[in-house]
Amino acid sequence: MACIVQKFGGTSVATLERIKHVAELIAEAHSTKQVAVVVSAMAGVTNKFVEYAQNLGSFEGDADYDSVVSSGELVTAGLLAITLKNMGLKSRSYAGWQVPIETSSNYGSAIIQFVDPTNLEKDIREGIIPVICGFQGISSENRITTLGRGGSDLTAVAVSDALKADLCEIYSDVDGVYTVDPNLYPQARRIDKIHYNEMKEMAALGAKVMQEQSVDYAMKKNVRVRVASSFVENEGTTISSDVTAKKFSGLAITQNLSQLKICHKAESHLPIIELLEQYFIRCEVLKVFNGKFSILIDRQKVPLMQSLLSKESHILNVKREMVRKNFSRISVIGSELTQGDCEKLISVLREAKIEVFYCSIRKNGINLIVLTDSLLRSIDVLHKNCGLGI
């Protein structure tokens, strides 16, 4: 009998009614397949716990922070297991440590080291549906760890690999991977099949369909993944290696970016970047010149960054910083992209009277920085010129 792992995101389990609907989907699959389930916290719950912890001065990197923000998954797993049992099925909820899912001690962004499938396999053989808390693991210090935001995707992929499942199904409120976020651009097209490399690039550069680390894990372990909606019946999008990569496959969008120009006396800007990384502030270095450098970061992180720079100014030799807000990054995802492709895209945007403030290129992606005011026009121009609507 085929074995599948089904993962349900926060919107899919946001209410008791939706949990009952998810239970019906699981029951239908269980009638013909062996099934293990991974769940996220109910929509909005993790954000609330993050707010509580941060208000008390606890942030990523603190073990107790992980204990707080991971607790929402325990509620979901328990409620879903109860619902399945009320339907006459056998089920059991699992915390990450009960599986166990062993991880590093990087609290807030732990790395999975080993998933022991023994307990899950025993349940599945006995007809019990295991409902596993996503996002959670356990460190060698015997502390709860979390796998980074969106980490339930990683849990599902890792459990799929451990169980040698035929398919890992990722359910959310979107019915697959689109050429661009359909909420921003209604003309976006759903992609039937996509290669791991392209999906990883999209996830890394702003597409929120799957967590980046989960795609990377799936690619390394060759776990076939299907992204689908728990609300709409269709085939969704299959992510695997059995796909021919296209020149252009999609656009990933990152909004709410701020540009910071930092003046400093030090010989290198790297100590500043290293400090930001310690506080999980991701940034993109745009330019380095004559004792100054320019970076892009999430606008919400600006106050924290300014506080850090002020506190450490005597060590980092920061003289001052200037902030420009309201930038967006459009990442054109494709295969074997060249400098010529980059120049072509800049040209078509300029023809549309859209200013490109910065451009960078790598093998599977071209990043274009524009003002947020021109984001929607930029998406329209690029979507059409890259042939993504076909």
Image: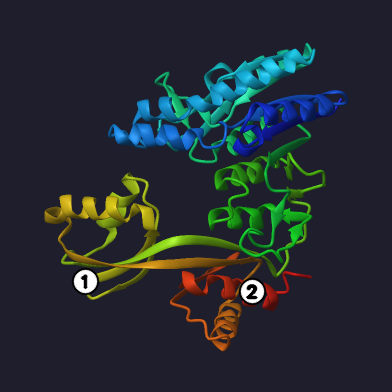
- Residue 316 position within the rendered picture, expressed as x and y whole percent measured from the top left: 18, 57
- Residue 1 position within the rendered picture, expressed as x and y whole percent measured from the top left: 87, 25
Decide if residue 189 is on the left or right side of residue 77. right
Q: Residue at x 82, y 43 (%)?
A: 233
Kind of residue indicated by mark 1: Gly
Q: Does residue 160 sit above or below 345 in this rendering?
A: above
Mark positioned earlier in the residue sequence (2 or 1): 1
Q: Does residue 172 sit above or below 269 in this rendering?
A: above
- Residue 351 position within the rendered picture, expressed as x and y whole percent measured from the top left: 57, 88
**CA distance for labels 2 and 1:** 38 Å
Indicate the quadrant where residue 318 lies: bottom left
Kind of residue indicated by mark 2: Asp
Residue 166 seen in render: yes
- Residue 148 position within the rendered picture, expressed as x and y whole percent measured from the top left: 48, 39
Q: Residue at label 1?
A: 291
The quadrant of the rendering that contains the C terminus is bottom right
Q: Nearer the viewer, residue 363 or 317?
A: 317
Q: Does residue 302 sit above or below 338 in this rendering?
A: above
Q: Residue at x 52, y 37 (%)?
A: 44
Residue 363 seen in render: no
Q: Secondary structure at mark 2?
A: helix
Question: Badge 2 local density, few (<14 within 10 Å), some, or many (20+)?
Answer: few
Q: Residue at x 28, y 58 (%)?
A: 270
Indicate the quadrant where residue 221 lies: top right
Can you tell which mark lies on residue 367?
Answer: none
Q: Nearer the viewer, residue 94 or 125?
A: 94
Q: Residue at x 48, y 78 (%)?
A: 356
Q: Residue at label 2?
A: 380
